[in-house]
Structure formats: C-alpha cells, structure tokens
Image (tube, rainbow, N blue to C red):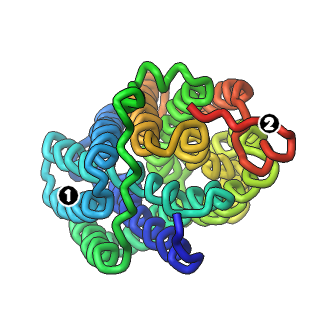
C-alpha cells in the first residue's frame, strides 16, 4: 500500500458518497411509507416482509460479491456495475402497483446494493493506512449513508413526494447512482490484487471463520443491531405519524435527526475506537440506545427535544462499521478480507434484517403499533452484553497494552 494521503482521502470520500446514495435509495420506501401504505393497502406485516425481503437479497449479494471480488481481484468494476444496477431498481420501485410488485422491486434492489459495502470496505482495508483504518471504514460506511440516506432521504423525498407524488420521488432517487458510478470509474484505480494463497493457504471457509471469537461475537451483535436498525426505519416513520400525531413533514425531520446524529458519530465513534479500543464503544452504546424507543413511547414535549433524545440514543449507529468491518478485518489475514466482510454483513442482514421487520410487524398487528419499540430495547440490551466477549483489536490499544495482534 503506497497510496498518497490525498488519494486515500479521495477513495474514502467517494466510497462514502456512493454508499450514501445506496442508502438514499434503500431508505426511500421507509420514509415514503405513510404515502405508499394507503394507496397499496399494506398491512404492518407486509411492510415488515418488504423490509425483510430487501435485507435477504442484500445479505446473499453481500456474501456473493465478497467471495467474487476476492477470487477475481476486480473490485472497482464490480462496484460500478452494482451501483448502476441499484439505480435501475429505484425506477422499478416507483412503478410498483401492488404488494407483490413492490416486494419484487425491493428484492432486486437488495441484490444490487448488497455487494457495495463489502467491496468498499475491502478497498479501504487494502488502500488506507492501517493506523487510520477504523476512522476510514467508519467514514466510508457511516458518513455518506447517514448524511444522504438517513437525513437527506426523509427531508428531501417527503417534500418532493408532497409536491410531485411518491412514485416520482423514487425516479428522483435513482439518478444519483448513475452519476456516482461514472465518477468512480474515472477517478478511482483498481486496487493491486494481493498474492494468491498457495495450496496450503486456501481461502478460509465459513465454519473456520465463525470459530474465531471476534467473528462470532460480531455476527451475533450484528444480527441484533441490524434487526434494530432496519426495524426502526421500517416502522418509526409510521408510528410518529399515526400513533404520536406528528404531521409527515415534522416526522421526516425527526427521522432526519437520526441521519445528522449518525453523520457525526461516523467520525466520533470510529475515531474514538481507534484511541480507546473497539470493545468499550461496542459495549456501552447499545445500552445507551434504549433512550430512543423510550422517548418515542413516553416523551410528550416539543419535537425539537424529541429529536435531541433520538440523537443521543442513535450514537449506537457509530458501531456498525466496527462490527461489520473494522474488527473482522483486524482479526483476519488481508487475503480473506472481502470474504469475512461479506460474511459479517451478509449474516447480519439475512438474520437481523430479514427476520427483524416481519417479526416486529406481526407483533404490531397482534399487540399494537408500539410493540416494535419494546423489541428494539430488548435487541439493544442483549447486544451490549454479548459485546463484552470481544477481544480488543485496535492497533494503538493492542500496542499500548503490549499484546500480540490476533490474526486468523
């Protein structure tokens, strides 16, 4: 890795921007659901199935693309193709006229988007100075996704839908991906392939990888917290409008506050983990996140104070790149990075993202539309306890304590 500091910054910025556009498309349906649900007559369970379906195809694609990019060593071209594909799927979402067609469009979108982040993290791991890996991977995954997907998507798309219609909002959401693919093609270089492993050093299998303590801890925490994340975005916009009585514009700004918070935490939490270690933030922040659901349930004050509660509770979003990318990439040899990152992200999505929303939707239909908030708190508390089993991997902390880095 002999890249200049300027190129490393450019790489992380463009990858973060691209993933932000991915999340802009992914979050579009969640934030527009108060408009989509009445027209298509969706139940809470169907809303959960749609969110879970996208997570399912996302998970399968994450693992497939990770293995493929490790095998052929062509990461940039795969990233460009995936970006163009998910833009096309956003247009398809705008054309859906029934639950079945909407589900199909979201399944295709998940299949296109799922490969973006494993490939991006593998590029960061190989092209960026390891001393800044935690911060770089945090920015690549969290900065753009939260600024565009979690902040701009609620604010911009809801306003655009009110002016022109929710279908037209999906057509708008598909355009930035095409532009991003062109920029990446011309401005980023293909990472130099790592040497192929000799016969005695064949690629690590899934059973071998999952036996590594940090890997299974990251998978368990990831399943719980991805379920927490996807469920929050699937049902919170509807809950704020239908149960708490906020108008759609105010609800969009409340959801947008999560994006602003996560944008800040993409720097703060990942950078802090470089200094004090991965384990402390992985343990503490899930417990702190229960403030968000409690505020949504019980706080009766002004909307701006509700947003403040959401911002504090959403600090947990800063640990996502840590358990999905940073700890796995620091726990395995570089030649296995895309594979183990695909495993980390894929398992989180296929178990947490796929099953979380349908379960929450069924619980809402059975016990009331606030039930999902209690589910969020249970997932968060269990995550905090499981993270206590992690073995520290932050290079600066490992060196400071005189420990040998554990690389499988």
- Picture quarter containing residue 364? top left
- Residue 84, percent across and down? 22, 65
- Residue 309, percent across and down? 72, 53
Residue at 29 percent across and 45 percent down: it is 65
Q: Residue furthest right?
A: 401
Q: Residues within 10 Å of mark 1 (few under 14, many from 20)?
A: many
Which secondary structure, mark 1? helix
Q: Residues within 10 Å of mark 2 (few under 14, many from 20)?
A: few
Residue at 30 percent across and 79 percent down: it is 186
Left or right of 373: which side holds 307?
A: right
- Residue 267, percent across and down? 67, 63
In front: mark 2 or mark 1? 2
Task: Count the numbered circles shown.
Answer: 2
- Picture quarter containing residue 362? top left
How far apart marks 2 and 1 lie (CA) works out to 47 Å
Q: Which residue is mark 1?
A: 89
- Picture quarter containing residue 283? top right
Q: If the image is split into quadrants, where does the C terminus sit? A: top right
Is mark 2 in CB contact (under 8 Å) with mark 1? no
The answer, for residue 183, to whether it is visible in the render is yes
Residue at 49 percent across and 66 percent down: it is 144
> Taking 181 as reference, is 225 above or below it?
above
Q: Which of the pair 355/114 is nearer the observer?
A: 114
Residue at 50 percent across and 72 percent down: it is 13
* Pointer 2 or 1: first along the chain: 1
Q: Which residue is mark 2?
A: 403
Which secondary structure, mark 2? loop
Q: Which of the pair 70/343 is nearer the observer?
A: 70
Q: Which of the pair 7/57 is nearer the observer?
A: 7
- Residue 78, percent across and down? 26, 57
The answer, for residue 302, to whether it is visible in the render is no
């Amino acid at each position: 890795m002999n890249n200049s500091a300027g190129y490393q910054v450019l790489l992380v910025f463009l990858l973060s921007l691209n993933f932000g556009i991915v999340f802009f498309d992914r979050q579009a349906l969640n934030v527009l659901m108060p408009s989509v649900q009445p027209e298509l007559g969706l139940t809470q369970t169907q809303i959960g199935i749609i969110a879970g379906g996208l997570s399912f195809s996302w998970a399968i694609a994450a693992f497939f693309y990770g293995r493929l990019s490790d095998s052929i060593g062509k990461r940039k071209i795969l990233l460009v193709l995936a970006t163009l594909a998910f833009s096309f799927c956003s247009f398809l979402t705008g054309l859906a006229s029934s639950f079945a067609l909407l589900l199909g469009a979201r399944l295709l979108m998940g299949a296109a988007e799922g490969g973006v982040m494993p490939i991006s993290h593998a590029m960061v791991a190989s092209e960026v100075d390891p001393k800044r890996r935690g911060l770089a991977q945090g920015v690549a995954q969290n900065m753009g996704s939260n600024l565009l997907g979690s902040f701009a998507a609620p604010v911009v798309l809801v306003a655009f839908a009110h002016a022109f219609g929710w279908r037209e909002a999906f057509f708008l959401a598909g355009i930035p991906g095409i532009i991003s693919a062109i920029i990446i093609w011309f401005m980023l270089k293909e990472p130099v392939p790592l040497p192929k492993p000799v016969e005695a050093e064949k690629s690590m299998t899934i059973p071998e990888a999952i036996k590594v303590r940090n890997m299974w801890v990251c998978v368990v925490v990831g399943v719980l917290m991805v379920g927490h994340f996807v469920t929050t975005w699937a049902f919170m916009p509807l809950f704020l409008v239908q149960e708490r009585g906020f108008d759609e514009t105010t609800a969009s700004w409340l959801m947008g506050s999560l994006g602003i918070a996560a944008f800040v935490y993409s720097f703060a939490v990942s950078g802090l983990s470089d200094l004090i270690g991965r384990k402390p933030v992985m343990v503490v922040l899930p417990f702190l996140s229960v403030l968000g659901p409690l505020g949504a349930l019980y706080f009766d004050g002004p909307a701006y104070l509700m947003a403040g509660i959401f911002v504090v509770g959403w600090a947990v979003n800063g640990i996502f790149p840590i358990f999905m990318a940073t700890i796995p990439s620091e726990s395995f040899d570089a030649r296995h990075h895309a594979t183990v990152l695909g495993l980390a992200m894929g398992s989180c999505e296929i178990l947490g993202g796929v099953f979380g929303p349908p379960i929450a939707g069924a619980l809402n239909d059975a016990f009331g539309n606030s039930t999902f908030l209690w589910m969020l708190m249970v997932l968060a508390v269990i995550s905090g306890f499981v993270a206590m089993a992690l073995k520290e991997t932050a290079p600066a902390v490992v060196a400071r304590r005189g420990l040998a880095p554990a690389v499988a």
